[in-house]
Each structure stands twice: as structure tokens, then as C-alpha cells.
Image (cartoon, helix red, strand yellow):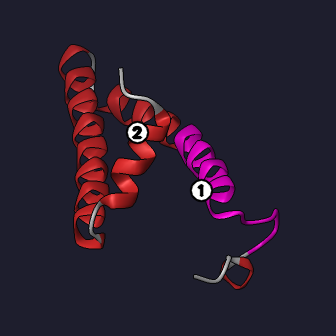
Amino acid sequence: MTSRDDNEKFLADLPEDKLLELMFTHIRGMWTVDGLYFLEIEEKQTAEAATEVDQNVWRVMGKIEARRLKEALAIKDGGGSDHWPKP
């Protein structure tokens, strides 16, 4: 099993373009999973049920992602982009 330190070193050693490609690949994968879940719920139930589940999941996921991004980028509560750390 790979340790967190190994993962961090791997990411730190990647050229910026590869790191961005990895990030975008992960994002596309997340959207693909969302779409597959939606289609499966739609097939087993209805489009309305799939839409309701999708909206509820993304409402919660939005809060989770916001919290994680704030932690990762050291953004304080109430801080907009003018409070973001400078690169």
C-alpha cells in the first residue's frame, strides 16, 4: 500500500501540466460516476426520482467540497477570493 508521503512526493514531482491533467481527469471521472448513477436510478425508477436524488446528493457534496477546499486553501470563514492565500 502506498503511503500518504509517497503520494505527496509523487504529486510534488509531477510537472505542472501533468498535475493539471491529473486533476481534470479526476473531475471528469467524478462527473461520469454522477451520470452513471443518474442513468441507473432513472432506469430502475423514474427521471424525476433520479433528478431528486441527484439534486440532494450535489447539495450535500457542494457543502463537503466547499469545506475541503477552504481547508486545503486555508480560506477563513466569510472569506471570498480577496481572502485567498497569495501564490
In terms of image quadrants, where is residue 36?
A: top left
**Residue 7, percent from left and from top:** 40, 41
Mark earlier in primary sequence (2, 1): 2
Q: Residue at x 68, y 77 (%)?
A: 85
Q: Nearer the viewer, mark 2 or mark 1?
A: 2
Q: Would residue 82 appear left or right of 58 to someone viewing this image? A: right
In terms of image quadrants, where is residue 34?
A: top left
Task: Write down the region rendered in magenta.
Answer: 59-79
- Tell me the residue that label 2 is attached to: 6
Indicate the quadrant containing the N terminus: top left, top right, bottom left or bottom right. top left
Q: Amino acid at mark 2?
A: Asp
Q: How far is disc 2 from disc 1 in space, using C-alphas?
A: 22 Å
Magenta span has 14? no
Q: Would residue 7 appear left or right of 39 to someone viewing this image? A: right
Magenta span has 60? yes
Residue 3 against residue 86 in the figure, above or below = above
Q: Amino acid at mark 1?
A: Leu
Indicate the quadrant containing the C terminus: top left, top right, bottom left or bottom right. bottom right
- Tell me the residue that label 1 is attached to: 69
Q: Secondary structure at mark 2?
A: helix
Main SS of the magenta segment? Answer: helix
Q: Residue at x 29, y 66 (%)?
A: 20
